[in-house]
Image: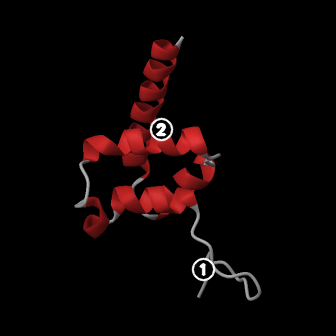
Amino acid sequence: MISEAPLRTVVPHVILLEKMLVDLSSDKMISTTYSKAEFPDAIEQAQSQYLIDEVRMLRYTRRRNRGEVLKSILKAARQIMLLHEKAVS
């Protein structure tokens, strides 16, 4: 079996923010707790507080067959960030 699962034995397993954001957008059980319209804002807030590796996140979405969906969400989040920057300046 070939897997991309982490092979750590010393350090406890850590869930990456990128994986959590992808799971929020793709897991049916989780996504029922919020509106899809809120997701771009959630990504924008995460990007304003943390460094998010978009390449890693997009790679994970492709593994979950959600690549195009997340690309459109990221595009919407960037538009929110641009609007926020214009309002502040």
14 horizontally vs 37: left or right: right
Q: Residue at x 44, y 57 (%)?
A: 22
Residue topped by disc 2 = 44
Give the distance between the C-alpha atoms of the residues marked 2 and 1, in whole angstroms: 31 Å
Q: 58 or 42, which lies in front?
A: 42
Q: Residue at x 55, y 53 (%)?
A: 57
Q: Position of residue 6 (x, y in %)?
A: 66, 78
**Secondary structure state at the residue bearing disc 2:** helix
9 horizontally vs 65: left or right: right
**Secondary structure state at the residue bearing disc 1:** loop
Given the current orientation, which residue lies at the most extreme top position?
89
Whether residues under marks 2 and 1 lie with C-beta atoms below 8 angstroms apart, the answer is no
Given the current orientation, which residue lies at the most extreme right position?
10
Nearest to N terminus: mark 2 or mark 1: 1
Q: Position of residue 34 (x, y in %)?
A: 26, 54
Within 10 Å of disc 2 (Cα), the crowding (few <14, some 14-19, many 20+) is some
Q: Position of residue 88 (x, y in %)?
A: 50, 16
84 shown above or below 32: above
Q: Residue at x 36, y 47 (%)?
A: 69
Q: Which mark is residue 53?
A: none
45 shown above or below 19: above
63 shown above or below 57: below
Q: Residue at x 61, y 48 (%)?
A: 52
Amino acid type for the residue under numbered disc 2: Glu
Amino acid type for the residue under numbered disc 1: Ser
